[in-house]
Image (cartoon, rainbow, N blue to C red):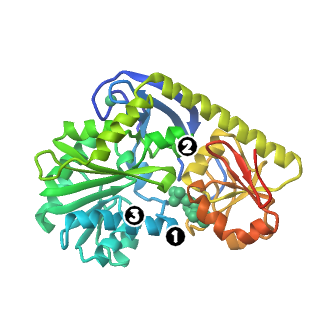
Amino acid sequence: MTTDIAKKVTTCRVCGASNWQDVISFGAVPLANAYLDEPGPEDAYPLELVSCRECRLLSLTVVVDPQVLYRTYSYVTSESETMTRHMREVARLCGERIGPGGLVVELGSNTGNQLQFFQAAGHPVLGVDPARNLAETAAQRGVPTLAEYFGAEVAGAIAAEHGPASLILGRHVFAHIDDLTDVLAGVKALLTDDGLFAIEVPYAVDLLDQVAFDTVYHEHLSYFLISTLDRLFARHGLRTVDVRRLAVHGGSVLVTAARADSRWETGERVGELIAYEKEQGFHTDARYEQFAARVRTTCQELTDLVRKEVANGRRVAGYGASAKGTTLLNICRLTRAEVQFCTDTTPQKQGRFTPGTHIPILAPADVAEQPDLYLMLAWNYAEEILRREAAYLDAGGGFIIPVPQPVVHTRREARR
Ligand code: TMP
Ligand code: ZN
């Protein structure tokens, strides 16, 4: 499918090959963050995963125009406890390597939460985010933000105005970018000689192990192994320096790279994870076939479970109208007939409707009567949510945790 808005992927954005394994097709799905003011007709685009047999990049088959996805962006970085703790940790890990005072540039800086931690540590900062609405919010908080797509040209302009950067950070943005060559050219143009480029991306190993199929949506073009990133960096004159596995967003990696000829040594964890990926079969078709089969089973079990609960007279609602909730609800064909409403703490989502499934989104305080069960659509915050919702659980409420296999979690039991 090639239209003005959706472009078909032909060659691999990492290695340039065009030897793809078809992994799974979810059919046409609306954009994950395209919440509706009123239920009505909407555009949908193919949501399909393929794996590059050369470098094992897991990729979508279509690229939706970033102008459509990001110029006005309703996704606001969560200010949950989990995320706040995580951002503090990222600032500490990166900050301790680059030393005091160096410029920190963040790509996809959203409303500036992450950069505030670097400001607090005494670094000059600059955010780059194409969403004009978010850049404005960030600027109001005192985080200078450029409302642009980062690439070689923008990097040159930043270097001319602010000087080179000691750290360029991109949290959950690298997987959203189609033209990695232009971004990496920008990184090289802007980094100091010993500067670091750090990215946080969902880890393909966790995606497959956790059957986290709902983290697949049109914004996420790439799902990376460390071996795939390592190959990408090498192709662009960079070298992987370190990697850390982190629990956020269902399992992510913070991967640090530097110029190939810089003073940084490559840490042991890099080679260990690359070897692990190989041992675990992540370079074979079979591993992706197995994933597709597990996704089908999980989806079917979830649909059956929710329908059974509803048939037994239970009221079910969604907890967190997350972007991955859009995938999950659409793929599992759960609509208002099964899920009466979704709660979400993000003011921009409240009063609107979920894409494709048209379920109303309420502020948690506007729920008149609690449902019998919440389908946890923000399962990446499960621990925090279960702790916060102790009173609801004490009163007999329950949560359905959808992946890796649907489980009902109540005070009395955890059952399938
Ligand atoms: P995220 O996983 O992309 O950060 O999105 C999580 C969504 O869930 C976001 O819209 C905020 C919402 N949410 C709640 O409604 N309640 C909560 O307790 C948490 C942690 C998130
Ligand atoms: Zn490839």
Left or right of 210? Residue 412 is right
Residue 37 drawn at (x, y percent):
61, 59
Residue topped by disc 1? 81
Dot placed on the residue nearer the N-terminal end, 2 or 3: 3
Image region (quadrant) for ligand 2: top left
Residue 111 is at least partly visible in this image: no
Left or right of 158? Residue 66 is right
- Residue 156: image quadrant is bottom left
Separation of disc 1 and disc 2 at Cα? 22 Å
Residue topped by disc 2? 212
Between 18 and 361, the one lying in front of the other is 18
Residue 86 drawn at (x, y percent):
43, 64
Mark 3: C-beta under 8 Å from nearest atom of ligand 1: no
Dot placed on the residue nearer the N-terminal end, 1 or 2: 1
Q: Residues within 10 Å of mark 2 (few under 14, many from 20)?
A: many
The local secondary structure at tag 3 comes to: loop
- Residue 350: image quadrant is bottom right
Q: Residue at x 29, y 40 (%)?
A: 271
* Vertical order, 115 against 211 (above or below): below
Closer to the eye: label 3 or 1: 1
Mark 1: C-beta under 8 Å from nearest atom of ligand 1: no
The image's mark for residue 166 is: none
Q: Residue at x 16, y 60 (%)?
A: 157
Closer to the eye: label 2 or 3: 2
- Please name the amino acid that badge 2 sits on: Ala
- Please name the amino acid that badge 1 sits on: Glu
Residue topped by disc 3? 110
